[in-house]
Image (cartoon, rainbow, N blue to C red):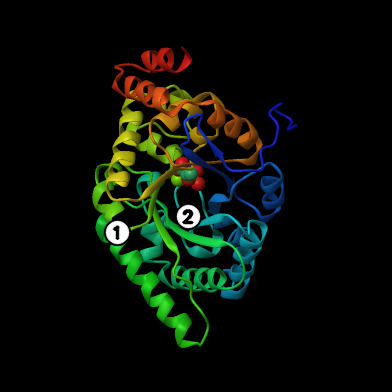
Amino acid sequence: ASDSGAAVVDESVETTDGRHVEVAANIGQPAELDPAAERGADGVGLYRTEFLFLDRETPPSEDEQYEAVREALDTFPDGRVVVRTLDIGGDKRISYLDLPEEENPFLGERGIRRSLAPDSDLFATQLRALLRAGADGAGDLAIMFPLVATVEELDAALDTLDAAAVDVEGRDADAVDPEVGVMVETPSAAFMADELAARVDFLSIGTNDLTQYVMAADRENERVDDLHDPTHPGVLRAIHRTVTAAHAEDAWVGMCGEMAGDPALTELLVGLGLDELSMSAVTIPEVKTAVSETEYSAASERGDRARLAATRSEVHTTVDT
Ligand code: PEP
Ligand code: MG
């Protein structure tokens, strides 16, 4: 049994009426890989690569990044490992990268915006490392881009990925052809989910940032804690929109924000149609249990009622009854 009381479930799980839901781990440090596997993670749904760049004077080499990703793939030889490309700016700063002083860093140069311009060399290096790591050994690599707001950004990131594959193959090394995905964490990405999903294999909803931007409520500011809550119907509608758009394009859709790790919300999220939930390892056993106790058809009706609610308290009434 886990600390939380739910038994560890090693197998993948499905609802009582047979809908498979992937339950994966969010990883921020290599030391979290083994504990996540022990808690029954099916794979890694969000590998935050910032740790590789923090607490040092110079960026990590391509080989160093290759090794780190190989380690994750080796820990989950039968699962998928979704590696997010470098996501700095906003609250995440790195001394040697000469980040600008901005009045509103969360609305500034962060995530893919930096990777496409000031940090394009780092981005290319990271992509080469990922493509090589995915081609060698076991495990199923996927690559995901953070804070995408426009189709142009995605197209530019995909071009950089293609160029990285050409570089790797030009060195007589193998490059994998990975699944590619976009994080949906800006309102624009939720509105543009149709066009984004048409270009990639999956979308992954980052509710920490998506809630911050949909609700205009700083994720770090306790004074607006009540607004920074993904169970507001405004956020649920953004989630629903994203799921519907992804499925219409035959893309799978996951969630890797904190919301995905709350077992009290599992039925709601399954009902909204999420194919994958990724969370910090601690709640994986509980969420797996919750998925296996959910009836998808009933959850789906309840999900519709929740997202059509007018207020958060109506959403909670729907979820709790
Ligand atoms: C998110 O924004 O929900 C997310 C998963 O990314 P991060 O918390 O690393 O910004
Ligand atoms: Mg985010």
Q: Is residue 89 above or below residue 318?
A: below
- Helix, strand or loop under label 1: helix
Q: Position of residue 231 (x, y in %)?
A: 41, 25
Query: Cβ(mark 1) to ligand 2 < 8 Å?
Result: no
Query: Cβ(mark 2) to ligand 1 < 8 Å?
Result: no
Q: Residues within 10 Å of mark 1 (few under 14, many from 20)?
A: some
Marking on residue 7: none
Marking on residue 199: 1
User: What's the amino acid at mark 1?
Assistant: Arg
Q: Nearer the viewer, mark 1 or mark 2?
A: 1
Q: Is residue 40 left or right of residue 274?
A: right
Q: Position of residue 201 (x, y in %)?
A: 37, 56
Res. 50 image quadrant: bottom right
Q: What residue is at 46 percent from the left and 34 percent from the top?
A: 219
Res. 80 image quadrant: bottom right
Residue 229 visible here:
no
Q: What residue is at 34 percent from the left and 43 percent from the top?
A: 186
Res. 299 image quadrant: top left
Q: Residues within 10 Å of mark 2 (few under 14, many from 20)?
A: many
Q: Quadrant of ligand 2?
A: top left
Task: Give whichever of 96, 120 is nearer the camera.
Answer: 120
Q: What residue is at 60 percent from the left and 57 percent from the top?
A: 78
Q: What residue is at 73 percent from the left and 33 percent from the top?
A: 2
Residue 23 visible here:
yes
Which residue bears the numbered disc 2?
88
